[in-house]
Every structure is written in structure tokens, then in C-alpha cells.
Amino acid sequence: MSSADTATGTTYLLVDGENIDATLGSSILGGRPTSEQRPRWDRIRDFTRSAWQQPVKGLFFLNASNGTLPMSFIQALTAIDFRVIPLSGESYEKVVDIGIKRTLAALAERRGDVMLASHDGDFAPELEALVDAGDRRVGLLAFREFTSTQLAGLTSRGLQQFDLEYDVAAFNISLPRLRIIPVDEFDPLNFI
């Protein structure tokens, strides 16, 4: 373990970019998001740093099974201090999930807090183990209404959930989401 991990603490931010993009596109926008409709990854990194007041190590997982890399996107992520992890394999649809699951399991063996950006219930066993260990903070960045029930069920046990739009303010636009609004938060100017 590095001295940075023990002296100041570290938050490991794992991003399932495909899951965030797919949820945004199919469930919220009804089509492929444009660059202006996508989250600002630097805001997500900054929110994570601010939420737990410690350095962040951002890991952005990409599916590179088609043999190509989106170099301009990778360069943009690298410029804002994300470590890009391009994975490939025969299970084209699941290489990112496999990489994230292995990383979550490896993090169980080291100090540091963990923040995951995904809605995918496939990560529930690994997040559950981290939450139940009780020796770190574990968080989830997602759209609350599209979070899998397996992940949402972990909030009662200590998983902290943050909404990408409302808590993180990761977007330059207001997304066309339908959500239950607590009356104390209701602003009619948002609707007229």
C-alpha cells in the first residue's frame, strides 16, 4: 500500500461509462446522447473528491473488443487525471463488467474508499462485500430511478447513493427525467 493511501486516504472512482451512456440514451433521452448531453467527467471526479474530502484515483473502463480506441475521448479523460482501462475479450458485452468486478474484489484487499458510477446489479456482490466490511465508505453515482434493485437495496446497509444530475450536477443541460419531487424542493419555474 502506498503512503498516499495510508496518510491521506484515497477514493477509487470506478466508471462504467458504457452503462452510464446506455442508461442516459435509452432510458432518459430515447436515443444516442450527443456530446452536449453526456456527463462532464471532470465534475464527477471533482464531486467525488469533495464528497469525501480526499484524493481521487479515477479508473474509466472501456470496451475495446472491436480493436479500436476512441483516442480523442481517451486523451480528454487522461487530461483530467483518469486512468483509462481499455479491455477486450470474447465476451464482448461483459469485458467492462469483468474488469470492474475484478477491480472491486482487489480493492477489498487494500485501504481506500470506493465510488462506482454504474446502475448495473452485476456489481452487487462485490459492493455488498465492501459495504459489509464496514472499514470504508462505499458510494454509487447513478440516476436513482434506474439503479438496479440489488444496488439500491444496499443503501440501507451503508451504500451512499448520489444522483448524477441532482447531486453531482454532472450535466450542462437539464435532462428530461420524471421523478418524484419532495414538495420542499418543488420549483414551479422549472415547469412553466
Image: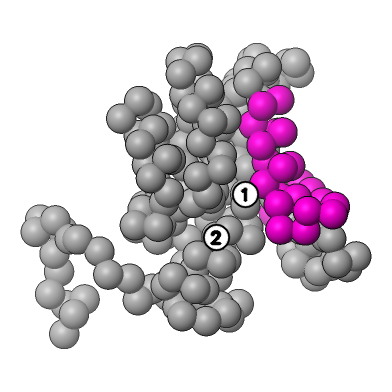
Amino acid, disc 1: Val
C-alpha separation, residue under disc 2 versus residue under disc 1: 8 Å
Q: Is residue 72 left or right of residue 141?
A: right
Amino acid, disc 2: Ile
Q: Main secondary structure of the magenta part?
A: helix
Position of residue 53 relative to residue 45, above or below, is: above
Q: Magenta stretch: give its range.
A: 77-106
Q: At numbered mark 1, what does the secondary structure look like: helix, strand or loop?
A: strand
Q: Is residue 181 left or right of residue 71?
A: left
- Rendered-image quadrant of the C terminus: bottom left
Q: Residue at x 53, y 56 (%)?
A: 43
> Of the numbered discs in the image, which one, if any, rests on residue 20?
2
Q: Quadrant of residue 59?
A: top right
Percent x, y of residue 111: 63, 18
Q: Quadrant of residue 112?
A: top right
Sequence-earlier tag: 2 or 1: 1
Q: Residue 167 in magenta?
A: no
Looking at the picture, tell me which residue is in the foreground, 170 or 118.
118
Q: Is residue 135 left or right of residue 41?
A: left
Percent x, y of residue 115: 54, 38
Q: Residue 87 in magenta?
A: yes
Q: Quadrant of residue 187?
A: bottom left
> Of the numbered discs in the image, which one, if any, rests on residue 15?
1
